[in-house]
Amino acid sequence: MAWWDKMGPGLMVTRATRVIANENYAIFNVAGGRVLLTALIGTVTTICAAAANVYLRLVPTLGTATTTNLCTASDVDATPVGDVMGITGIPGDALYPGGAATRSSIPAMTMPVVLIVGALQYCSDAASGGGAIQWEVWYKPLDDAGYVVAA
């Protein structure tokens, strides 16, 4: 058994809450090398009072690598305080849960994701109405120097 198998879901990093808006911005940075993303969870801290189509992507800083969406957009309108959202790990799946589905619990990622050095970004293509989300990631380093920090 490798040492990382003993880490459970891995190391956790929490990002300070930020009001969501119609913009793209880094929520975490992957630095030093590759990491294995094992969980990514957003917790609503201020109700999302208007349409906000939210998705997450990795914008690499190395070579000619291209931006990769980690999920497709979901409308988080009317998501109440305390509800959670996340990704399955399959890029074509929507930010979970989509639409008006219950968000009080979600399944963990079904597929871990390898991330190279770059910015893990929050993206929205609609106004937020002032909602706010706190994000947390769990990861395992794949390269000796690989780590994640809040942006």
Image (cartoon, rainbow, N blue to C red):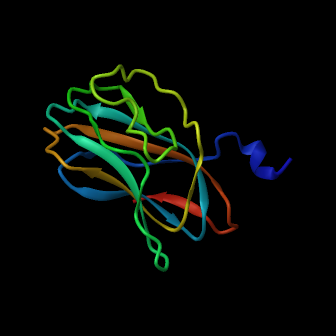
Q: Nearer the viewer, residue 28 or 118?
A: 118
Image x and y of residue 123, in percent: 29, 52
Image-based side of 8 in relation to 45, left or right: right
The residue at 28%/43% (across/down) is 54
Residue lying at the far bottom of the rendered structure: 63
Query: Can you tell which quarter of the image residue 144 is in?
Result: bottom right
Above or below for 78 versus 11: above
Q: Nearer the viewer, residue 1 or 93?
A: 93
Above or below for 50 versus 135: above
Image-based side of 66 in relation to 126, left or right: right
Above or below for 25 versus 91: below
The residue at 13%/44% (across/down) is 127
The residue at 58%/71% (across/down) is 32
Query: Can you tell which quarter of the image residue 96 is in?
Result: top left
Image-based side of 97 in relation to 137, left or right: left
Image x and y of residue 149, in percent: 49, 59
Q: Nearer the viewer, residue 29 or 113?
A: 113
The image quadrant where one finds the C terminus is bottom left
Image x and y of residue 29, in percent: 45, 62
The residue at 26%/57% (across/down) is 24
Image x and y of residue 132, in percent: 26, 39
Count of numbered circles on the image: 0
Residue lying at the far right of the rendered structure: 1
